[in-house]
Amino acid sequence: MKFVGVDVGGSSIKSAIIEIVDEAVKPSKIERISTPNSSAGKIFDAICDQIQEYRQQHPDIKGVGIATAGLVDTESGSVNYAGNLPADWSGVSITKEIESRTGLACHLENDANSFALAESTYGAGKSKGIILGIALGTAVGAALVVDGKVYSGSNGFAGEVGHMIVEPNGLYCVCGQVGCLETRVCQSAILKESGAKNFAEAVASLSKINSNAREALDTYEDWLTIGIINALVLYAPEIIVLGGGLVLGYPKLVAEVEEKVKARSSVFPAEQVRIKQSKLMAAATLTGAILPLVD
Ligand SMILES: [Zn+2]
C-alpha cells in the first residue's frame, strides 16, 4: 500500500511516498520545498501540487498523512495553534481541504506524535511497550507511545518533555513559560553558544581543539541529560528514541548523551537506561503521519 507522507514545518514542507510492504516501511526519496508563509491557501496549493506529481508516477496512492507542529485535533483534522505557520493554517479542517481537493483520504497528526509512533511501530522502539520519542531540531518535539498508541493525556500535551521547566530563572520559551528544557536544547541554543552559522558548521568545527562548538555541544548534552533523567523518573520508558535534525547532523550525540544519563541517573538504574538513535531517521515523521491510514 502506498501513501503520501507530508511534514509541514515553519521553513520547509517535506514529503515522500511511503510504501508499506509485508510489515516493512519503504520511503521514497524525500522532496523538500520552502513553506509558503503568506497564507494557508498557498500551503494547500503546494501540498496538492506535490501530491499531483506523485500520482502521475503512482496512480495507486491510497491516502495522505500530514504531520504538523502545534496542538492537533485529529477528529476535526485541524490544528489549534502552530507558531511558525500562517495564522489561517490554524482553526480550519486541513484534512477536509486536502480530501476535497484530491479525493484521497487524509489524516492529520502532530509531528512529534508521528515521529514517536513511527519509531515504535517500525523503528528503534519496535516491540517495546513504552517508548518516549524526542525529536531534536529547531524546536524539541516529544511524545510517549504506550502499547502502540500515543498517550497524549487529558489535553493532548502529555509527553512534551521539551516544556518541562528545568531552570527557575531561565530563558523565555515560545510556549509562554520561563526556563523550559527546549530553550536549552533547541538548535539555536547550540548556534548561539558555538558562534557557528548553521549546525553543519558547528559539527565540522568539533575536530578543533578547544572549539566553542564542542563546549556548546557539551552544554547542550548536559541540559538534555537533565531533561531525559526527569522523563525517566516520570514515565519509566523501556526505550528513549532520539531523532530530528540535530541527530541527523551529529548521530554521535545519542551515545554521548546515553553515557551522561547513565553516569548521573540513579532513581532509574543505569543498566535499564536505553537511548537509541532513530532508525527511520529523515523518514520517521513522514512514516508516522500515514500510519493511522494503514488498515
Ligand atoms: Zn516551553
Image: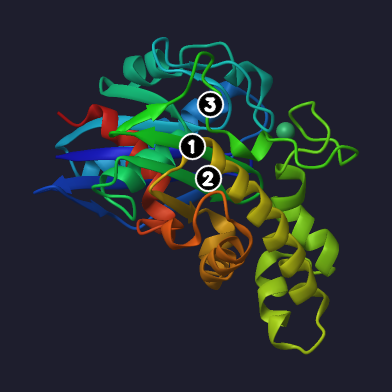
Q: Nearer the viewer, residue 109 or 273?
A: 273
Viewer can see residue 12: yes
- Mark 3 and mark 1 lie on one chain; the one further toward the N terminus is 3
Identify residue type, mark 1.
Tyr
Which one is nearer the viewer's eye here, 151 or 237?
237
Tell me the residue that label 3 is attached to.
158
Of residues 150 and 57, the one nearer the viewer is 150
Q: Which residue is mark 2?
A: 232
Mark 3 or mark 1, whichever is nearer to me: 1
- Judging from the image, what secondary structure is the residue with disc 3 in? loop
Badge 2 vs badge 1, beta-carbon distance below 8 Å: yes
Circle 2: element type: helix
Which numbered dot is residue 279? Answer: none
Residue type, label 2: Leu
Colour scheme in use: rainbow
Q: Secondary structure at mark 1?
A: helix
Q: Where does residue 136 sit, x and y in percent of width and height?
A: 59, 51
Q: Residues within 10 Å of mark 2 (few under 14, many from 20)?
A: many
Q: Quadrant of residue 76?
A: top left
Residue at image x 41%, y 17%?
A: 74
* Residue to which mark 1 is pinned: 235
x then y, percent, for residue 215: 79, 73
Q: Can you name the residue that lies furthest to the right here?
A: 169
Task: Please say if the residues under marks 3 and 1 sit with CB atoms less than 8 Å apart.
Answer: no
Can you give x and y, in whole percent of width and height, for residue 162 in the image? 64, 40
Name the quarter showing ligand 1.
Answer: top right
